[in-house]
Image (spheres, grey):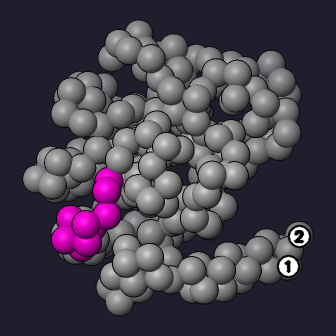
Amino acid sequence: MILSYHSLDSSGSVISLPPAEFRFQMDCLASSGRRVVPLVDLPSEPDGVAITFDDAFLSVYQTAFPILQEHRFPATVFVVTGHCGGFNDWSSQPTGIPRLELMSWQQTDEVSRYGVSIGAHTVTHPRLSQLDDVAVERELVESRDEIQNRLGGAVETFAYPYGDHNVSVRNAAAEHFRISCGTTLDFNSPSSPLSDLPRLDVYYLQSRFLFRNLVKGNGGSYIFARRSLRALRSLVAY
């Protein structure tokens, strides 16, 4: 199971989770007995839980990092390298998303020294399926290389912005990263493709009752229902 977070704030946006709810969820995980593992270890830990954050918002450093440290939980933060130290004002940003500050390279380096893995999330946060092969390659390679040059060590993980990809994008990601994460709302299984691992967006898990059930191994029918509704909305939109 991979949990997917973005910002920890009280704005109520679709990318936001109130800090108090993040605290509850981490405390719940700690008391559940579920093993929280690094994302790269998840394929060999089918009952494990991996924690991921897209975009590297400053709130991850200010709010999430101390709580993760308290519980000694590993996590992965996916960085948009061209905006690190700036704001989430990339050109593809949908309306209704608050303008929020992102972690600096210094802060990214700090968390990387204490149990947080840094993954790539492209340079400019585009919809990759709308780019040609050359531009896709540039977004993947330049983001990976920038992180490696600044922080050292290999970058093994990647997350598709907006979960947007196609066959050629997935193939390109598989050439450069050991694991790539999408946004399919589902649990992991041994058959989950490493080029598009599903994740559980915590936007749908803000009910404490639901989250408790989830970490106990229940909640599959709820996730199925939410996934079906999301797919239906997507069809209607097109």
Identify the residue shown where x is 29% and y is 44%.
Answer: 74
187 displayed left or right of 57 = right
Relative image position of residue 139 (x, y in whole percent)? 65, 25
Relative image position of residue 43 (x, y in whole percent)? 53, 44
- Mark 2 touching mark 1, by CB under 8 A? yes
Identify the residue shown where x is 75% and y is 26%.
Answer: 172
**Res 154 → quadrant:** top left
- Which residue is nearer to you in this view: 107 or 11? 107
- Which residue is nearer to you in this view: 11 or 209? 209
| Residue bounds of the magenta highlight | 28-36
Identify the residue shown where x is 26% and y is 25%.
Answer: 109
Q: Please state which amino acid type lies under the numbered disc 1.
A: Val
**Res 63 → quadrant:** bottom left
Is residue 138 among the parts visible in the rendering? yes
| Dot 1 alpha-carbon crowd within 10 angstroms: few under 14, some 14 to 19, many 20 or more | few
For label 1, the residue is: 236
Q: Please state which amino acid type lies under the numbered disc 2.
A: Tyr
Q: Residue furthest right?
A: 238
Q: SS for tag 2?
A: loop
Q: SS for tag 1?
A: helix
Relative image position of residue 160 (x, y in whole percent)? 63, 43
Can residue 30 be found in the magenta stretch? yes
Quadrant in the picture for the C terminus: bottom right
35 displayed left or right of 148 = left
Can residue 123 be found in the magenta stretch? no
Q: Residue furthest left?
A: 70
For label 2, the residue is: 238
Which label number is shown at residue 105? none
Compared with residue 229, is residue 104 higher up or lower down, i.e. above or below?
Answer: above
- Which residue is nearer to you in this view: 68 or 121? 68
